Image (cartoon, helix red, strand yellow):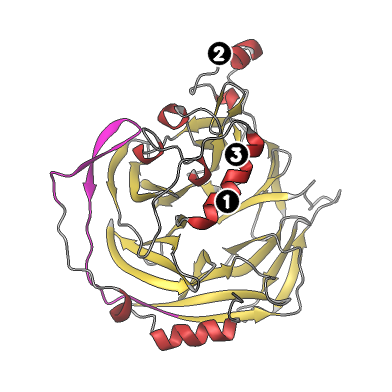
């Protein structure tokens, strides 16, 4: 079926009145102290708070038909500007508020303000723009578009003997892990530290073939920018272990909250897990998205090729959670997800662990940042219909 164009989508959205009254019908549910769940083997409290609120989102879109990039890019809000980084060329396009091009920055090359190779992922924040390269290299760009720091990821600082890593892999060994490229969503995490997503493809201990992997493995690395060392951390909720084996949905995301807490979410888990600043699990909260297919088939593979084929087949057939971000200006946690619909996906807004809004958004909407008064999201198939880039804006009112 041919997808409708953007004007048709916006028209349908307007007709359906993507406002709070049309999309949320939550009755306040006080937390039940008797509810418990598990995370990483530890039993914790679960709070299912939801309440009707005056918050609402109204959608429109912006287009640019002049900028042509490779089609593989990363959108962010940085220094109060909309930016798009081309993964293949390393060029960062800086846009005006109407999505007209303002300037270009960085790029791949040998110059003093260029990166060495392709771009894997990016994080924006008050400390600058963090760029993760394709050769375990990283860069920090300041607000004047100057690369102020470079370095390389170090998974081997523990000096565990190579033979030990090879013959006796253990989940607590940092040296058995590597970047997880497919689900890479770095996040600034405290002063001069960045959280990255990690996994193991060790021949004897990996997420592709070992069904006990998710019971013990770490999934997060804390990068110390002063020396490049990676401290491993994290874990997986029970939905990934036991009778289920769904490595094709192992993506995770982190949202730091005012340096006091951080929230961790997973593609396949409706729950959000809240941690203290020192990494201790506090409790879980959150709600499932609307109209999601979550009957996830197991993926058993004999080798990497079979796994890749299975992943490509299964991911489009199910729904899962996508982005996670905290808007400090509004004290709101944003979580996106895919719906079982050809036209719509979904977005949730939480405050103080309480769900305030669950609203439909255009199919392919991928939230990437907030700039007063809009939540911005890209269309994740930019060149599917015609040569233009599209950005959606959700106007936040409360």
* Image location (x, y in percent) of residue 318: 47, 55
Q: Mark 1 or mark 2, which is nearer the start of the sequence?
A: 2
What residue is drawn where x is 22% and y is 58%? 49
Q: Mark 1 or mark 3, which is nearer the start of the sequence?
A: 3
Which quarter of the picture shows residue 160? top right
Gap in angstroms between the C-alphas marked 3 and 1:
10 Å
Residue 67 falls left or right of residue 84: right
What is the number of the mark on residue 313? 1
Quadrant location, the C terminus: bottom left
Q: Which residue position is annotated with label 2?
A: 168
What residue is drawn where x is 61% and y is 76%? 2
Which residue is at the far right?
Answer: 110
Q: Residues within 10 Å of mark 1 (few under 14, many from 20)?
A: few
How many marks can you see? 3
Instruction: Check whether the beta carbons of the residues at disc 2 and disc 1 lie within 8 A of each other.
Output: no
Gap in angstroms between the C-alphas marked 2 and 1:
33 Å
Gap in angstroms between the C-alphas marked 2 and 3:
24 Å
* Image location (x, y in percent) of residue 298: 46, 41
| Camera-side residue of 70 and 155 | 70
Please tell me whether mark 1 sits on a helix, a strand or a loop: helix
| Camera-side residue of 27 and 375 | 27
Please tell me whether mark 3 sits on a helix, a strand or a loop: helix
Residues shaded magenta: 32-58
What is the number of the mark on residue 307? 3
Residue 368 falls left or right of residue 359: right
């Amino acid at each position: 079926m041919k997808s409708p164009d953007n004007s048709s989508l916006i028209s349908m959205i307007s007709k359906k009145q993507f406002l709070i009254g049309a999309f949320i019908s939550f009755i306040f549910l006080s937390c039940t102290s008797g509810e418990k769940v598990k995370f990483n083997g530890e039993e914790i409290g679960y709070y299912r708070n939801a309440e009707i609120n005056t918050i609402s989102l109204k959608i429109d879109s912006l287009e640019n038909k002049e900028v042509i990039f490779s089609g593989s890019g990363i959108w962010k809000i940085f220094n109060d500007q909309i930016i798009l980084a081309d993964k293949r060329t390393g060029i960062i396009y800086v846009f005006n508020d109407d999505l007209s091009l303002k300037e270009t920055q960085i790029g791949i090359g040998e110059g003093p303000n260029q990166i060495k190779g392709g771009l894997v992922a990016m994080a924006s924040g008050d400390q600058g723009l963090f760029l993760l390269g394709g050769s375990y290299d990283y860069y920090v760009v300041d607000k004047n578009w100057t690369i102020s720091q470079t370095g390389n990821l170090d998974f081997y600082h523990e000096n565990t003997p190579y033979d030990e890593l090879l013959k006796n892999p253990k989940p607590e060994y940092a040296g058995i892990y590597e970047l997880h490229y497919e689900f890479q969503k770095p996040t600034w995490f405290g002063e001069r530290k960045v959280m990255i997503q990690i996994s193991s493809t060790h021949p004897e201990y990996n997420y592709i073939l070992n069904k006990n992997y998710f019971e013990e493995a770490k999934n997060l690395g804390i990068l110390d920018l002063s020396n490049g060392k990676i401290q491993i951390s994290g874990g997986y909720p029970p939905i990934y272990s036991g009778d289920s084996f769904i490595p094709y949905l192992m993506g995770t995301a982190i949202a730091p909250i005012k340096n006091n807490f951080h929230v961790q979410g997973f593609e396949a888990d409706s729950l959000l897990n809240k941690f203290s600043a020192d990494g201790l699990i506090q409790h879980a909260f959150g709600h499932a998205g609307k109209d999601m297919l979550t009957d996830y088939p197991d993926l058993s593979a004999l080798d990497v090729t079979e796994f890749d084929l299975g992943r490509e087949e299964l991911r489009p057939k199910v729904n899962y959670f996508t982005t996670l971000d905290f808007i400090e200006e509004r004290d709101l946690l944003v979580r996106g997800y895919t719906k079982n619909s050809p036209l719509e996906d979904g977005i949730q807004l939480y405050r103080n662990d309480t769900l305030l809004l669950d609203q439909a958004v255009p199919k392919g909407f991928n939230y990437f940042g907030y700039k007063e008064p809009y939540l911005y999201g890209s269309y994740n198939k930019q060149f599917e219909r015609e040569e233009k880039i599209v950005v959606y804006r959700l106007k936040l009112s409360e």
